[in-house]
Image: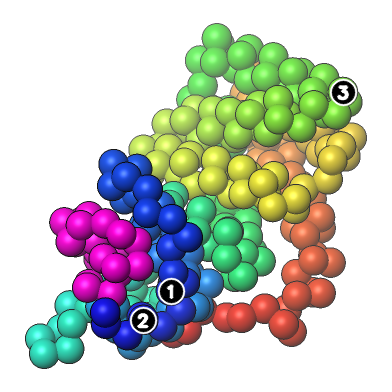
Amino acid sequence: MNPPSPGVAPAQTAPAEAGLHGRVLDHLGTAICGGELTPGAALNIDDLVDRYAVSRSVIREVLRVLASMGFIETRRRVGVMIRPAGHWNVFDPQVIRWRLASAGRIAQLRSITELRTAVEPHAAWLAAHRVDHDEASELVGLAAKMWAAGKAGDEDRFLGLDIEFHQRVLRASGNEMFVKLQDLVAEVLTGRHLHHLMPHHPHEQALQLHADVAQSIQRRDGDSARRAMVQIMEHAFDEMAAMWEQESTTEPQPAS
């Protein structure tokens, strides 16, 4: 057997190959995002085959996917090497999921929230000028459902409605580039929920701001829609600020 690849723990079992591709991919992706596998580290195909008890074809497919995300590269006479974070496709929803599951989740939350702050307020402004009557009415109804779920403490339902609300605003903007960000928004909101980084009961101010966005869009008031969405983003920053400050000195930073 070849020596172990750095940062890769042995597999506990040897499940059938049919379902193992995703598990091996998730394990390696999370290890790279979390810094367990550092830039320049080598991955040995034979070692991975032994550790995960899968065929070489499964490992090759996993490595192909990782290469498409910018995580690895193959060098002559060296083999498969981990690439620095600057090469990663950070907009890939799976990469976001892995980063949120790793020790670097706070940095990921911060960077995505900064991106959302830049994009979603303008998306709300555009939606107010481009949305049709039915879409606007549905958005108002969705905000009302969010309010009810939030007040009832139904976290799973609120999460689903929150994701749908922000995705609808992005779609209603009519900008195809903004629309492509909807999976990213879903990943970060789901990640905050899964990793207990959201309050159990949404603050009433946040619920009201979602209603304000929807009603402003329905009134075709783009400026008010943008201001309310900015406040939603600021509220998200406030919720996470203490957490960021607490972990800023201890959090491992992605290698560059």
Q: Secondary structure at mark 2?
A: loop
* Part of the protein shown in magenta: 45-69
Few, some or many residues within 10 Å of mark 1 (<14, 14–19, 20+): some
Q: Look at discs 2 and 1 and give the one toward the viewer.
A: 2
Circles 2 and 1: CB distance less than 8 Å?
Answer: yes
Q: Look at discs 3 and 1 and give the one toward the viewer.
A: 1
Q: Look at discs 3 and 2 and give the one toward the viewer.
A: 2
Q: Nearer the viewer, residue 166 or 58?
A: 58
Mark 3 residue type: Ala
Circles 3 and 2: CB distance less than 8 Å?
Answer: no
- Judged left or right of residue 85, residue 135 is right
Report the residue marked by disc 2: 4
Few, some or many residues within 10 Å of mark 2 (<14, 14–19, 20+): some
Q: Which mark is residue 152?
A: 3
- Judged left or right of residue 164, residue 79 is left
Circles 3 and 1: CB distance less than 8 Å?
Answer: no
Report the residue marked by disc 1: 8
Indicate the position of residue 84 as horizontal and vertical percent values.
Answer: 38, 80
